[in-house]
């Protein structure tokens, strides 16, 4: 099945290229006479032509010198693009022609023509137009920036945006990487690629992501036992097929979803809003760490009929990356060190090497039908298939459990910490994981708009589905030496590791390329399948009005309702019953796969080569004894046992909402004011199915497992008022105010009726029984859900100052304050859990279980700045900066009040993108930075708190430089290059103190180069 899907993806990529060749010629013959409604103010000619190009979706070419010191009149009405240009240049010494590629070219009018009546223009070949100096092509980087400012300027509340021109011109592999240039937005990367976003310091769970205003379904993390819940994985969507992304920071009452952080709305093009087109984008993607080059591309097209009443849009995108990223992880703890007593010392050191083959095919489609001027039907669809084949190769150098054999003569202590030494007789683990993830997303939106006697009725329906499956389940193989059998281990973590992002050495004298020295321990399998589905029905009713209430004019009233039915089904199985097929013997070749020679070459000074698991041999040679012929079942192929039921769950969620909104206009003295006020009521009801598994003593004194299915029903109601006002201080200056109460529901995974335990612990107890508990390295921690959680709620205040420059650009500043109640943190307690043993018995084990609980109140405040400008000779800059602060107080009965930080909040984050545009050439650099922020363990509550319980883990400050450049070969064809992580930066983490690093993450550079064209 996996091979078939990959062949389909590759076939789609080939079809993509062939389709571009076939359709390119036909596209040029499409009509250029679509009429568009324009609203352009009187202004300098160059700015008016650029605005006309944006509103019409047409390419307009001209030189700055040609239109210098010329002014354009106001233009309002519905025209074809060429007719609109002629109206703008009427009476000026200019002419307009259309080249063979469909671009409009504005040029000086010949002297003879100025003295005689105008005649029909003769088309000029695009080659001739290209010979002119300083040709301006309006689809450049700066035009996209200006479109983003237009969206911000005209929004109903405080918002920011990225539009398609930006996305196409920046080194953005996905939507998250495009959004990191928005003020207040930071991203969470995986292997250097953007995956989630945070807004104003609040993490991915606090962002409501919608598709044209309707809810999306969520893919689940199936990489390990950790779950992401309501975090939308933006990496599954291609930026090349999206028209615009709007980040709404101050909500209005009609928003279907409004997260405490923001609402991120992803939008497609409307086919009736622009001329027919075909656009293609083909490039090679080079990954430095794996030294691989892979094909990528997209093809999209839009068409409408002659009377502009019916249009269709479609697009397909293919992407492939083969990535390698290294993670060196180290913990720290208090240890009794020979010759030094109890001091801080490193925990186990673990070099993780991950190799991933990422393949994504995505498609979008849209139909727009306007049979009469007052009736419209829209259908939009989105599909994405994201496959990620992952191989993890890992070593564990055990330190705390072997510290008694530390050679005191080799020990190095800095500031009370053991940072280097040699253990004479160590223990080493050689570990590997293999899995093939498949994430599928389907979204369908249907909308009708009916204008009737001044009322607008807008019923909407959406269906969203997200499937996350393991085509190859998580397969884990462990080899491990006995104590004192791992050779002499040398580690050296001295010096400023955070600053260098590198340690001096980590190696053992044991030959890790000799499989005979590494005893086999276990082979375990974990299938996971997750389904998330949402069906939403929305009705919006509105009417423009002109009520005057003592100087306050009511300009519009709107009301409506929402009904959503969502479910999440999460199924997990754990099997340690792997067995060799009859007649097969495990040999040294099973541990003979070479590890790439560049592994950890940047993060470890002196390291050592090693061989690891050959996954082909393991998959050919093993079966699940008595259950499955092979080792790649889905969760549905295996009958769940007690532990499986405890790890699985289903959640049904029903949402009923209603809202009312009033738009108004007035004057505050001499200052015009417009805005809106509204109130939204939301009721959420959940049914959570799970299983409680408990060890129970039998009358004979033994232990058996009691399995109890359980369903927990809960509900809550919230009233969410909102108000927004926009003061037009001057023609190009506005001041905005926003106030709202917002809500973020608990993560779906936090609501589960289940307990997840460590997979290695489950395997070891199954194989060894009670003897496994004697291992000092055993992990006796688990995580549970809480179906009775309440939502986070927040009162938000926002203030924004926006100054839009006359020619290009803007300066904006915003302040925000959020007061969050019912913050969710982890409460810890010891529970006795039942573990299965391979002889059929049950072993009761005390495990420390973390459970999410509403125990806190948080405040987050900050200021944002944005600046965009461009000089006359083509040099410009767009920059953003955010300064934030946060406070969290946790209060649990029997513990008292504890202070902690809010995860994901950087005190400082900024992005600066200088760009240069001259004729057919453009170049931009983008540097984004965020200061250190807490990642986890900073918001813990326990019944018996200790210093270890509240040690916070931090991601150190990190900046990344990206580059983009292009050259216009023809008016509709350009070559481009994009590079990510140009400086080859590495991320570093630490725990509590900067002296105790915990992770060094290396992911390397990526370079894309190719051609994009539009017909």
Image: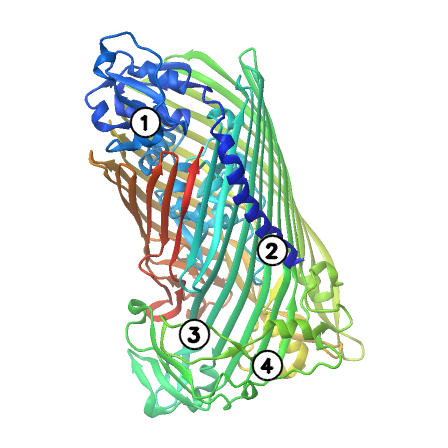
What distance separates the C-alpha of mark 3 from that of mark 2? 28 Å
Question: Mark 2 to mark 4: distance in Å?
Answer: 28 Å
**Residue 599 found in image quarter:** bottom left
The residues bearing labels 3 and 1 have C-alpha atoms spaced at a distance of 52 Å
Question: Which residue has dot 3 on it?
Answer: 597
Precedes in sequence: disc 3 or disc 2: 2
Residue sticking out furthest to the top = 117
Point out which mark residue 50 bears: 1
On the question of residue 670 being in view, the answer is no
Q: Dot 4 corresponds to which residue?
A: 589
Determine the residue positioned at 70% across, 60% down.
Answer: 635
Mark 3 closeness class: few <14, some 14–19, many ≥20 residues within 10 Å: few
Counting the numbered discs, the total is: 4
Expressed as whole percent of the image width and height from the top left, the position of residue 496 reads: 28, 72
Badge 3 vs badge 2, beta-carbon distance below 8 Å: no
Q: Residues within 10 Å of mark 4 (few under 14, many from 20)?
A: some
Between marks 4 and 3, how big is the CA–CA gap? 19 Å
- In the image, residue 918 sits, relative to residue 525, either above or below, namely above
Badge 2 is on which residue?
6
Question: What is the quadrant of residue 462 in the picture?
Answer: top right
Q: Foreground mark, 1 or 2? A: 2
Q: Is residue 722 above or below residue 282?
A: above
Name the residue at 43% across, 74% down: 597
Q: Position of residue 645 (x, y in %)?
A: 70, 61
- Residue 846 pos. (x, y %): 61, 73
| Crowd band around label 2 with a 10 angstrom C-alpha radius: few (<14), some (14–19), many (20+) | some
């Amino acid at each position: 099945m996996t091979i078939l899907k990959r062949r389909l993806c590759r076939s789609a990529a080939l079809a993509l290229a062939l389709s571009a060749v076939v359709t390119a010629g036909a596209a040029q013959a499409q009509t250029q006479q679509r009429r568009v409604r324009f609203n352009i103010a009187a202004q300098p000619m160059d700015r008016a032509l650029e605005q006309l190009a944006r509103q019409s979706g047409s390419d307009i070419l001209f030189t700055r010198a040609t239109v210098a010191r010329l002014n354009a009149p106001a233009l309002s009405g519905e025209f074809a693009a060429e007719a609109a240009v002629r109206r703008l240049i009427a009476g000026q010494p200019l002419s307009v022609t259309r080249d063979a590629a469909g671009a409009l070219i504005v040029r000086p009018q010949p002297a003879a023509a100025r003295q005689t009546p105008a005649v029909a223009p003769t088309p000029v070949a695009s080659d001739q137009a290209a010979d002119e100096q300083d040709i301006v092509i309006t689809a450049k980087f700066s035009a996209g920036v200006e479109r983003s400012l237009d969206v911000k300027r005209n929004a109903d509340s405080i918002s920011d945006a990225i539009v398609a021109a930006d996305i196409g011109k920046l080194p953005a592999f996905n939507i998250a990487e495009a959004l990191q240039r928005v003020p207040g937005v930071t991203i969470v990367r995986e292997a250097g690629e953007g995956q989630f976003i945070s807004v104003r310091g609040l993490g991915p769970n606090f962002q409501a992501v919608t598709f044209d205003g309707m809810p999306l379904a969520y893919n689940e993390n199936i990489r390990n036992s950790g779950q992401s819940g309501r975090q939308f994985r933006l990496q599954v969507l291609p930026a090349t097929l999206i028209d615009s992304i709007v980040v709404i920071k101050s909500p209005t009452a009609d928003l279907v979803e409004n997260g405490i952080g923001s609402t991120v709305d992803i939008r497609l093009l409307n086919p009736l809003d622009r001329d027919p087109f075909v656009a293609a984008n083909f490039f090679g993607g080079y990954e430095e760490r794996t030294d691989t080059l892979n094909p990528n591309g997209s093809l999209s097209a839009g068409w409408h009929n002659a009377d502009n009443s019916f249009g269709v849009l479609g697009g397909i995108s293919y992407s492939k990356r083969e990535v390698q990223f290294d993670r060196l992880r180290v913990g720290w703890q208090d240890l009794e060190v020979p010759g030094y007593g109890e001091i801080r010392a490193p925990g186990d050191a673990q070099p993780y090497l991950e190799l991933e083959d990422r393949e994504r095919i995505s498609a979008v489609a849209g139909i727009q039908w306007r049979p009469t001027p007052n009736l419209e039907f829209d259908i939009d669809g989105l599909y994405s298939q994201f496959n990620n084949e992952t191989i993890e190769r890992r070593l564990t150098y055990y330190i705390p459990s072997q510290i008694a054999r530390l050679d005191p003569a080799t020990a190095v202590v800095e500031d009370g910490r053991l940072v280097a030494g040699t253990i004479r007789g160590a223990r080493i683990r050689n570990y590997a994981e293999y899995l093939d993830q498949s994430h599928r997303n389907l979204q369908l939106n249907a909308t009708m708009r009916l204008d009737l006697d001044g009322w607008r009725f807008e019923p909407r329906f959406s269906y969203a589905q997200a499937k996350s499956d393991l085509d190859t389940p998580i397969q884990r193989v462990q080899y491990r030496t006995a104590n004192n059998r791992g050779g002499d281990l040398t580690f050296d973590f001295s010096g400023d590791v955070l600053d260098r992002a590198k340690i001096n050495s980590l190696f053992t004298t044991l030959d890790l390329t000799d499989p005979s020295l590494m005893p086999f321990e276990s082979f375990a399998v974990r299938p996971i399948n997750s389904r998330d589905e949402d069906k939403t029905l929305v009705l919006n009713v509105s009417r423009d009005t002109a009520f005057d209430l003592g100087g306050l004019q009511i300009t519009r009233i709107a009301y409506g309702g929402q009904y959503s039915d969502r479910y999440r089904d999460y199924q997990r199985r754990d099997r340690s019953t792997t067995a060799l097929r009859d007649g097969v013997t495990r040999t040294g070749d099973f541990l003979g796969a070479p590890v790439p020679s560049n592994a950890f070459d940047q993060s470890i000074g002196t390291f050592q080569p090693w061989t690891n698991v050959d996954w082909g041999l393991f998959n050919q040679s093993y079966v699940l004894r008595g259950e499955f012929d092979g080792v790649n079942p889905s969760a549905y192929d295996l009958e769940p046992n007690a532990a499986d039921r405890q790890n699985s769950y289903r959640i049904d969620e029903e949402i009923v909402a209603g809202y009312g909104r009033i738009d108004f206009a007035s004057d505050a003295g001499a200052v015009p004011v417009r805005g809106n006020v509204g109130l939204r009521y939301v009721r959420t009801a959940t049914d959570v199915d799970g299983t409680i598994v408990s060890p129970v003593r039998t009358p004979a004194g033994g232990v058996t497992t009691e399995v109890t299915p359980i369903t927990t029903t809960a509900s809550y109601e919230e009233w969410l008022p909102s108000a927004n006002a926009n003061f037009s201080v001057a023609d190009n200056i506005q001041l905005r105010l926003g106030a709202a109460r917002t809500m973020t529901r608990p993560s779906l995974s936090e609501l589960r009726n289940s307990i997840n335990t460590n997979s290695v612990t489950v395997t070891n107890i199954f194989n060894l029984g009670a003897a496994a508990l004697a291992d000092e390295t055993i992990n006796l921690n688990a995580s549970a859900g809480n179906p009775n959680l309440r939502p986070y709620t927040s009162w938000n205040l926002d203030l924004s100052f926006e100054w839009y420059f006359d020619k290009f650009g803007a300066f904006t500043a915003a302040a925000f304050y959020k007061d969050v109640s019912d913050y969710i943190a982890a409460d810890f307690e010891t529970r006795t859990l039942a573990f299965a043993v391979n002889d059929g018995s049950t072993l009761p084990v005390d495990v420390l279980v973390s459970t999410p609980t509403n125990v806190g109140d948080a405040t987050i405040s900050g200021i944002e700045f944005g600046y965009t400008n461009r000089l006359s000779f083509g040099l410009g800059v767009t920059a953003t900066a955010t300064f934030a602060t946060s406070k969290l107080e946790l209060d649990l009965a029997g513990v008292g009040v504890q202070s902690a930080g809010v995860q994901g909040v950087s005190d400082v984050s900024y992005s600066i993108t200088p760009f240069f545009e001259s004729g057919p050439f453009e170049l931009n650099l983008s540097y984004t930075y965020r200061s250190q922020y807490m990642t986890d363990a900073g918001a813990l509550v326990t019944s018996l708190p200790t210093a270890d319980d509240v040690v916070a883990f931090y991601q150190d400050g990190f900046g990344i430089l990206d580059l983009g450049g292009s050259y216009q070969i023809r008016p509709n064809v350009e070559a481009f290059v994009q590079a990510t992580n140009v400086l080859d930066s590495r991320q570093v983490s630490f725990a509590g103190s900067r002296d105790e690093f915990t992770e060094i993450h290396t992911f390397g550079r990526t370079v894309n180069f190719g051609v994009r064209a539009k017909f």
